[in-house]
Image: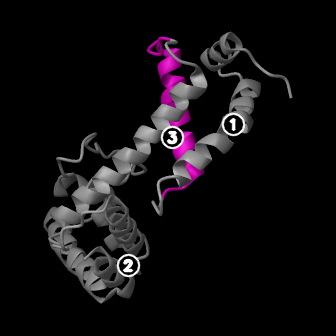
């Protein structure tokens, strides 16, 4: 496999060169995959993180926002790492807004486990519509066309936007969100793994 220079990589990205992009994937993905999995038990798909980061990086290169103060590999890795950190912060914010009041956890590892478990339970809700409403309301989702999701975790997506996206009435969206949140609370309350993590944290 031809090894591209830094200049060739940047020129290739500016021109959407498929060969350069394939080279980046084959050369950089293994390291980024290890980095993603280094966030212990964080429920993130390494390939999704890589694609998300690569799209952002390519866009910045094409807009000349990348100043070349580091190698493109380092730059891409940093973007992917920041994406993982952002997801963790959003997950913690969701836990707080959902009304759950777990015991104070002093060890970061236990906190990560709780965040991970919460995400897993949300992702595995039987009611698909419930999962979608919760994701939209707390700004977790990025794959809902037409939704102006907030870039920070301090704001929620409005029920009017949720209703429009899911093709339901705004009042119905609010009521369904409340019911779905209660379902998730019940799932958390009955979850033995969640209880065990709390026990280990005490």
- Look at the magenta stretch and give its main secondary structure: helix
For disc 3, the neighbor class at 10 Å (few under 14, some 14 to 19, many from 20) is some
Instruction: Please tell me in which quadrant of the rendered image residue 54 appears.
Output: top right
Task: Indicate the quadrant containing the N terminus: top left, top right, bottom left or bottom right.
Answer: top right
How far apart marks 3 and 2 lie (CA) works out to: 27 Å
- Relative depth, front residue between 175 and 43: 43
Local SS, label 2: loop
From the top left corner, tell me how far across and down residue 73 is, in percent.
Answer: 60, 27
Q: Relative to residue 72, is residue 64 drawn left or right?
A: left
The residue under label 1 is 25
For disc 2, the neighbor class at 10 Å (few under 14, some 14 to 19, many from 20) is few
How far apart marks 3 and 1 lie (CA) works out to: 12 Å
From the top left corner, tell me how far across and down residue 67 is, in percent.
Answer: 47, 11
Q: Residue at coordinates 39% horizontally, 82% vertically from top-left?
A: 193
The magenta-colored residue range is 44-67
- Asked whether residue 169 is in view, the answer is no
> Circles 3 and 1: CB distance less than 8 Å?
no
The residue under label 3 is 52
- Relative depth, front residue between 199 and 178: 199
């Amino acid at each position: 496999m031809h090894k591209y220079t830094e200049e060739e990589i940047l020129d290739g990205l500016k021109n959407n060169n498929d060969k350069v992009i394939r080279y980046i994937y084959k050369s950089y993905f293994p390291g980024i995959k290890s980095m993603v999995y280094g966030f212990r038990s964080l429920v993130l798909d390494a390939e999704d993180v890589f694609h998300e980061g690569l799209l952002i990086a390519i866009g910045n290169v094409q807009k000349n926002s990348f100043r070349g103060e580091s190698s493109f590999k380092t730059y891409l890795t940093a973007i992917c790492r920041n994406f993982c950190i952002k997801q963790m912060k959003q997950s913690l914010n969701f836990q707080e807004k959902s009304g759950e009041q777990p015991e104070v956890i002093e060890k970061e590892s236990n906190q990560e486990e709780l965040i991970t478990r919460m995400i897993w339970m949300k992702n595995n809700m039987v009611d698909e519509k419930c999962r979608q409403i919760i994701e939209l309301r707390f700004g977790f989702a990025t794959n809902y066309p037409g939704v102006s999701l907030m870039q920070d975790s301090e704001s929620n997506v409005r029920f009017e936007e949720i209703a429009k996206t899911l093709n339901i009435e705004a009042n119905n969206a609010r009521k369904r969100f409340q019911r779905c949140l209660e379902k998730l609370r019940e799932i958390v309350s009955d979850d033995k793994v969640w209880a065990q993590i709390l026990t280990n944290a005490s």
